[in-house]
Amino acid sequence: MASITILGAGNVGQHFAKALHQAGHQIVQVYNRTPRRLQALMPYLPPTTQFTTHLQQLLPHNGLYLIAVADDAVAAVAQTMPAVPGVVAHTSGATPMSVLVKHPRRGIFYPLQTFTAAHTVHFEQVPFCIDAALPHDAEFLQAIAQTLSPRVYAITDEQRRILHVAAVFANNFTNHLLAIADDLCKTNGVPFEILKPLIAETLKKTEQQPPRNVQTGPAKRADAQTIAQHLALLQNQPHYQQLYRLLSESIGKMYHGNP
């Protein structure tokens, strides 16, 4: 099992610290810029784990230094931390490996999953996307990932960045659209629960067939009358109306070759 330092104790870092510890790895040290997150993590890790708010206090001889901070902070952390002999990897889907250029043994340890503080992540279901500058380091990262999940993939930098875009469509945008549906229901006194079987069936279909093959609805049918009625109902919510129109045009273009 690996000796690991985790840099970042936010949502991703906390989930990783707990999961890697439970998988039998030694969490030697955890860094975070502020102490509050470290204090929240302490009860879940053994008393031998060290905690620090200073990058220059990183212990030098661990096998893996896992940078699990916000995307826009990865480069700064990688540049500021001292040079170490172990593998330095980050967990970001959008950040290129090149930001780790200071570290010869660099890599990617990207979990394609959404993380929130209060929600349990079942790591055995999480796909891991692995890359490294050196082949033996890629094998090292893959071996660690396989202690968490059987779904481990060798993915290049460019593939991972495109995959992250796809994930934004599949997760972030989808959730935003569900939030809009929830808002429309609440505004009109309709329980959102009525939509939940439809949502579940929509996702279930995509497990069995490509999403393109199971599209339904007025835009797929080119039902201009229904679309016009829906747009009229949204006249007092111009932002939602604009989104409805844009998405209907996108569906129309995909299936009929025209907006």
Image (tube, rainbow, N blue to C red):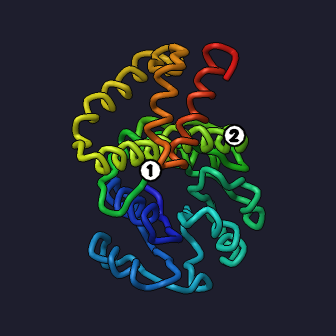
Residue 156: mark in rendering = 2
Could you tell whether 186 is left or right of 75 in the image? left
Three-letter amino acid code of the residue under disc 1? Thr
- Res 89 seen here: yes
Is the residue 40 above or below the residue 24 in the image? below
Is the residue 58 above or below the residue 138 in the image? below
Pinpoint residue 163: horizontal percent, then vertical percent. 61, 39
Could you tell whether 113 is left or right of 167 in the image? left
**Residue at 36% from the left image edge and 50% from the top image edge:** 183
**Residue at 26% from the left image edge and 42% from the top image edge:** 192
- Res 112 seen here: no
Q: Nearer the viewer, residue 251 or 111?
A: 251
Mark 1 neighbour density, 10 Å: few (under 14) some (14–19) many (20 or more): few
Q: Nearer the viewer, residue 79 or 139?
A: 79
Q: Secondary structure at mark 1?
A: loop
Residues under numbered marks 1 and 2 in contact, where contact means CB atoms less than 8 Å apart: no
Q: Secondary structure at mark 2?
A: loop
Could you tell whether 58 is left or right of 215 in the image? right
Mark closer to the observer (1, 2): 1
Pinpoint residue 187: horizontal percent, then vertical percent. 32, 50
Q: Which residue is mark 1?
A: 114
Three-letter amino acid code of the residue under disc 2? Thr
Pinpoint residue 43: horizontal percent, then vertical percent. 27, 75
**Residue at 29% from the left image edge and 49% from the top image edge:** 186
Q: CA distance from mark 1 to mark 2?
A: 21 Å
Could you tell whether 15 is left or right of 101 in the image? left
Q: Quadrant of residue 249?
A: top right
Pinpoint residue 99: horizontal percent, then vertical percent. 74, 62
Assign the C terminus to one quadrant of the image.
top right
Sequence-first tag of 1 and 2: 1
